[in-house]
Amino acid sequence: MNRIKKSLGRMEWNERLFVGINYSVLTLITLVIVLPFWYVMVVSITPYQEFIERNGFILLPRQFSLEYYEYLLREGSTIYKAYYTTIRNTVGGVMLALFLTATSAYALAEKQLPGRRWILLFFVLTLFFRGGTVPLYITVKQMGLLNTDIILILIMAYSAFLMIIMKTFFESLPESLRESAAIDGASEFRILWQIVLPLSTPALAAIGLMYMVTYWNDFFNALLYVSDWNKAPVQLVLRTIIANSSLPPELLEAAGTTPPPTVGIQMACIIIVALPMLVIYPFLQKYFQQGMLIGSIKG
């Protein structure tokens, strides 16, 4: 704080005005981001009677209640099943996606690979041209993957864009490391596993985080390819609660009890779904920034 005061004391009036405007704008942006989430959290722990009495305008609750969370997280609830499905899809999907992305990127990072430019062009074309939702749905149906546990893992298990970032990172590593390992008789897979990947922690963390967020937030693919609520991810449950302003009949039947007011269930469900990413992201933010900067500079 003292350093800031000293630096401000040495500034001209126009510099102080510029700094003041910057702080004001950043403060306003922070409030715009934080206040909606704060409101959602406060409503989720406020009794419904107080919510009605204050016309929904609550920044600090007078009373505290976990009624909505107890209802959503009761034993055998649909949220538990959906959470298990989402965690399984996210963990399995990220592991598969990182394996496919790292192996293909490692192969394309080898400048002596025959047909390397044409293969890379094939991947780049997929960024601009896609078959569309209907052909993809027909393909999934013909392969017998509709309403299966594995479809939500396979459908997002590869990204050509993230592969290119990973390839760029691999190309930035010294070639002497791979050459010396190859001279010692190491196979390509051993070079990748024991030399390249340990040096690629920032890129792996950044790309893994992007895959993780994609899997965790996905509901559209579940809406298309899954019809069994026992296989639905938590985002699809949240989307159904928010879109319908009420619990779907399948969830009401599974509950067996009278649900609390919908507005509290919506807010509590948002907190339950968003909390894991809010907890995990700060620990991976450093690697995420490093990975993105290295890929952009070398690209």
Image (tube, rainbow, N blue to C red):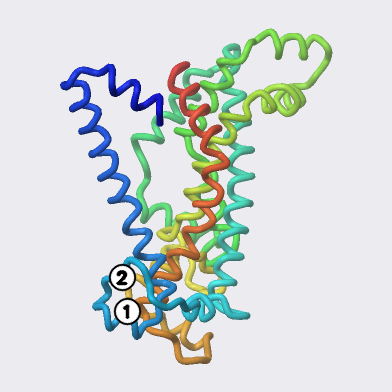
- Which residue is painted at 47% across and 49% down in the image? 214
Q: What residue is disc 1 on? A: 51
Residue 207 in the image, given as x and y percentages of width and height: 53, 36
Spot the residue most to the bottom: 257
Identify residue type, mark 2.
Ile
The residue furthest left is 14
Residue nearest the viewer, comparing 203 with 276: 276
Please count the marks in the image.
2
Camera-side residue: 264 or 56?
56
Q: Quadrant of the C terminus?
A: top left
Assess disc 2: are there few (<14), some (14-19) or many (≥20) residues with their C-alpha within 10 Å of its C-alpha.
some
* Image marks 1 and 2: residues in contact by CB distance under 8 Å: yes
Return the mark for residue 58: 2
User: Is residue 240 at all visible to an observer of this figure?
Assistant: no
Which residue sits at x=68%, y=23%?
Answer: 196
Q: Residue at x 48, y 18 (%)?
A: 117
Q: Report how far apart the C-alphas of labels 1 and 2 lie in the structure.
A: 7 Å
Q: Residue at x 54, y 72 (%)?
A: 79
Q: Is residue 266 visible?
A: yes
Name the residue nearer the viewer: 86 or 17.
Answer: 17
